[in-house]
Image: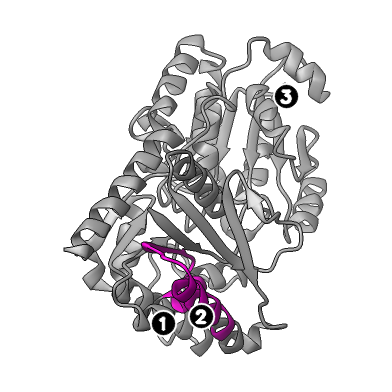
Amino acid sequence: MKILTVADFFYPGVTGGASIVIYEVMRRLVGRGHQVTALIRQQSQTPALVDGIEVISYLPAASTALYPLSVARCMGTIARLLTSRHIDLVNAHHAFSGLAAELALRQYPEVPSVFYFHGPWHKEAQAKEGALPAAGERQTNLPLKYRLRRAADRFVLGSCDRVAGLSDYMAAEAAAICPEVTGKFCKIPGGVDTIRFQPATDRRAVRRRLGLPEEGLVLLTVRRLSPRMGLEELVRAMVRVEQTHPDALLLVGGSGELRGRLEQLIDELGLQRTRLLGYIADTDLPAYYQASDLFIMPSLALEGFGLSTLEALACGVPVLGTPIGGTPEILNGVLPDFVLAGTSPEDLARGILEKLPRLPDTGLSLRVRSYAEGFSWDRIADGVEQLFTSLLGLHRR
């Protein structure tokens, strides 16, 4: 099978949930004998060949105001590839790339398409700009710039042959935008590299290597530092945690626009055991999981799945998460009592304090590790391969 994957970005040029999903699945499909070409926006640091995946790029417009020009350039590159090569199936990720792909495919009805829905484009823009309504609040009179993004999602969801998504939560978000998607949605969860992410044989040695205290409880979260991730709420929760458990240390890994605000908040609250680590390199990430007793997922909104939840579980670390998005879908299968009642600092503090007496627990560590093994990337690739193959067979008939 010859697959054209169209995405806004790709690993290792950009790290993040969506890029990791694309990379991990596509490289396994290459390993099974399929040919994969990834078309992305121009990224100078992305090599032309990544683990057998051919990566090519188009030049986007200089500003977001010129989106139509970027769409046209992406469409033109897709059309050239479809004309010059035998492409069996187009798999688009992200609404922008999906829009260009579906418009280009109007001239190639013989080529089926699968859209991987990673989240509603308009809500992601709202969250980034601090304009996302509170949970349960219904928004009317959506500003034009968000309506256009929602319309793009609706067009792509309605035009493609199949929609793949990471969770039931994503299925509901897609159906809210385009009700017709219900009959063609396929849930394919995220995965984890169970070789790279595994429990430490000597946690103290790992902590020594990272410069962390060998004794005491280590709490960890790894997030993009943006408002929807719930990091301000988690930092506020640490006031009560530090008062009750002075040996508990919170490590916050990640970079983003909220860095300055979090530094200021830690200082204002007088927290002594809460550290911002900044961006954690991929090579060091498994060690930070292995050094931890509890991973915290404090999301406020749009948590489509949460690959870091699986990475922590694969390292034998239990995860405490808010009842947002796909997090409960993961935890209900192994740690249903680790799903918090809400997202407030009080909910987080109460949940942390309730769970700390149970840590560390070897039996719990073995149980969550065993559960995570069911989400190996090879199993996830099985689902994607089956979806692509069945769609291609139906389309040809």
C-beta proximity under 8 Å, tags 2 and 1: yes
Mark number, residue 75: 2
Residue 265 picture location, percent across and down? 76, 51
Task: Report the Cα–Cα distance between label 2 and label 1.
Answer: 7 Å
> SS at mark 2?
helix
Question: Is residue 15 in sight in this rendering?
Answer: no
The prevailing secondary structure element of the residues shown in magenta is helix
Question: Is residue 34 in sight in this rendering?
Answer: yes
Name the amino acid type tagged 3: Pro
Name the amino acid type tagged 1: Leu
In the rendered view, would you say 336 is above or below 363?
Answer: below
Q: Which residue is mark 3?
A: 246
Q: Which residue is mark 1?
A: 103
Residue 238 picture location, percent across and down? 66, 38
Residue 92 in the magenta stretch? The answer is yes
In the rendered view, would you say 229 is above or below 201?
Answer: below
Query: Start and end of the magenta stretch?
Result: 72-101
Say which label, 3 or 1, has the lower sequence index.
1
Residue 366 picture location, percent across and down? 46, 14
**Front residue of 79 and 301:** 79
Classify mark 1: residues with Cα within 10 Å, few (<14), some (14-19) or many (20+). some
Residue depicted at x 56% and y 51% = 53
> SS at mark 3?
loop
Residue depicted at x 44% and y 53% = 304
Residue 33 picture location, percent across and down? 43, 42
Name the amino acid type tagged 2: Met
Say which label, 2 or 3, has the lower sequence index.
2
Residue depicted at x 47% and y 21% = 369
